[in-house]
Amino acid sequence: MKKRIGILTSGGDCPGLNATLRGVAKALYQRMGEDVEIIGVINGYSGLIKGEWRVMQPREFNGILTVGGTILGTKRTPFKLMRVIGEDNVDKVAEMKKNYKEMKLDCLLCLGGNGTHKTANLLSEEGLNIIGLPKTIDNDIYGTDVTFGFHTAVDIATEAIDRVHTTAGSHSRCMVVELMGNKAGWLTLYAGIAGGADIILLPERPYSIESVCSAIERRAEQGKSFSILAVAEGVFHVAESRMKRKERMAKRAELGYSTATNRIAKDIEEMTGFETRVCVPGHMQRGGSPSPYDRLLATQFGAYAAKMVENEIYGITVAMKNNHVEANKLSDIAGKARLVPESHGMLDVARRMGISLG
């Protein structure tokens, strides 16, 4: 009897989703041949709730190793709403369980970030056979050293910083580059160091605008006519750190900005006199072909997930630890985030290089 393996991609897109789908599929077909059937769930958990799926053909996984995005489509379906019955009167958890059974799945593979893994754990606790695969450019999934999509995003963000260097130098400006990362600063930290940023601001470390401006002025005293700031979108200053998130966002809305970046630029101009510009690469950091590193990582993760399917090991998510692919229990990692700790070696590298951390 054929094994029926469901697979979905959920949350924000990132480079490496298709490469991971390919890794899973090719490894399953290689090991199980005609004894396996892959069911593609359309648009993540939204498709699982609505019963939108199709039987995949082996040829659909050909030629997608280098392709960005996801052939299955993706949508954000917040975990906090999964048990909330809205105006449509749909019990989302009940519908997902019902459609899992109607698809006659032996297991379901869920590719996604923190929210995806929380829902994956919920479904596992509801008795479904679930395997997670860690995807996010933020690199903030607990229990794994790296997630696929992160290294490609670092490449893109670094190139953005590289490109503003010449403009900053030519015009004697401060350039503030806003990078993705609402709660975790891994992307900004790595791209900031790789791109030669002079100041790096992370969500984990509330910044002082006085410290930022002092760093810029010290560079000016050394004859350096420009400064590059790599700023994570989720940063907040010391005064805001004493506010609750809703209070902080309400205050920002009142002042006419959603992220701190524009305020930082305005404050720099007012406090130092340096002309300052903001650059926001935005969703470019999510797009395009995955880097060779991410293609390799995605293939490793996909092949390992296929091994877990073959061995009927469920309730887990794939992880990379000390350059070795292994599994974590979903229940051990769901609801946790991997943030940049104060003791992390890259922060020490930044300080030793004279980079201000605000």
Image (tube, rainbow, N blue to C red):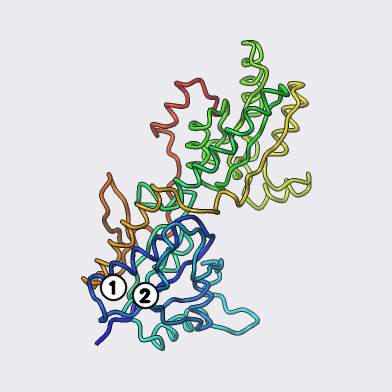
Spatial CA distance of label 2 from label 1 is: 8 Å
Quadrant in the picture for the C terminus = top right
Of the pair 335 and 216, the residue shown nearer to us: 216
Placement of 310 over or under 117, stated as above or below: below
Q: Which disc is residue 29 wearing?
A: 1
Q: Which disc is residue 248 wearing?
A: none
Give the quadrant of residue 226.
top right
Which SS class for mark 1? helix
Question: Does the residue at mark 2 contact the one at mark 1 (Cβ under 8 Å)?
Answer: yes
State left or right for residue 274 relative to residue 26: right
Of the pair 182 and 57, the residue shown nearer to us: 57
Measured as percent of width and height from the top left, residue 249 is found at 68, 50
Quadrant in the picture for the N terminus = bottom left
Residue kind at label 1, given as amino acid type: Tyr
- Point 50% across, 56% down: residue: 14
Placement of 172 over or under 293, stated as above or below: above
Measured as percent of width and height from the top left, residue 130 is found at 35, 71
- Point 51% across, 67% down: residue: 79
Give the quadrant of residue 170.
top right
Which SS class for mark 2? helix
Placement of 287 over or under 215, stated as above or below: below
Residue named by callout 2: 58
